Amino acid sequence: MHMTVTGRNLDLTPALKEYLADKLLRAQKHFDYPLEVVALLSVAKNPSIANSQTAEITIQVNGTTIRGQESSENMYAAIDLVADKVERQLRKYKTKYWTHLDEKRLKLANEEAGSAVTEDDSDTAVMKALTLDEIKPKIVRSKKFPLKPMMPEEAAAHMDLLGHDFFMFINFESGHVNTVYHRRDGNYGLIEPDA
């Protein structure tokens, strides 16, 4: 594993780095090549924030970004939480990725064998496909609504009035579709397209 660790408002001790590396080794066991890991450990200086110590992990896997962020009152607990989260995400990614590859390999093998698929093989393939369909998340609801031009602050107010976690709108200044959302720290975030 290749790991880059950065500390913000925190003294990065060798013990802390070693603890982080040990926790992330569990995630590495799912892959037979070294993962590229970027970690940011930070402490919020605001005394009103209860869970002021945050561990953020970013891993690039085959062009896919796996990211986890957790906060706690103590950095070691935050590292435990984020390491568990990232390991679950990597396991889920590998399961989906390899299952997809296995389906392609099975299809290629059947085509190369002259499409000589026995009844048992087709039953197995159908059962496997049904099982995979049950696991995959589906779009269960679709909603259309008119986007109105407004300022980001006004969009944030609308979002709060509706009780939603995010709100899409047309930015009055740029004319582009933007999204405001609630951040974990209690503030708002704004997502804008790259011009």
Image (tube, helix red, strand yellow):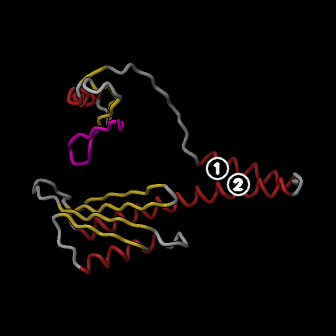
Outermost residue toward the front in this view: 195
- The segment highlighted magenta reads 181-195
Q: Is residue 195 left or right of residue 151?
A: right
Q: What residue type is labelled 2?
A: Glu
Across and down, in percent, residue 169 comes to 32, 26
As displayed, is residue 22 above or below residue 36? below
Element type at marker 1? helix
Across and down, in percent, residue 105 comes to 73, 58
Q: Residue at x 49, y 61 (%)?
A: 61
- Residue 120's tag is none
Q: Is residue 21 left or right of residue 126?
A: left
Across and down, in percent, residue 14 comes to 25, 80
Quadrant of residue 113 within the rendered picture? bottom right
In the image shown, does 188 or 141 lie closer to the viewer? Answer: 188
Across and down, in percent, residue 27 comes to 46, 69
By secondary structure, the bulk of the magenta-drawn segment is best described as loop
Q: Is residue 128 left or right of residue 64?
A: right
- Residue 132's tag is 1
Q: What residue type is labelled 1?
A: Leu
Quadrant of residue 160 within the rendered picture? top left
- According to the image, label 2 marks what residue? 103
Element type at marker 2? helix
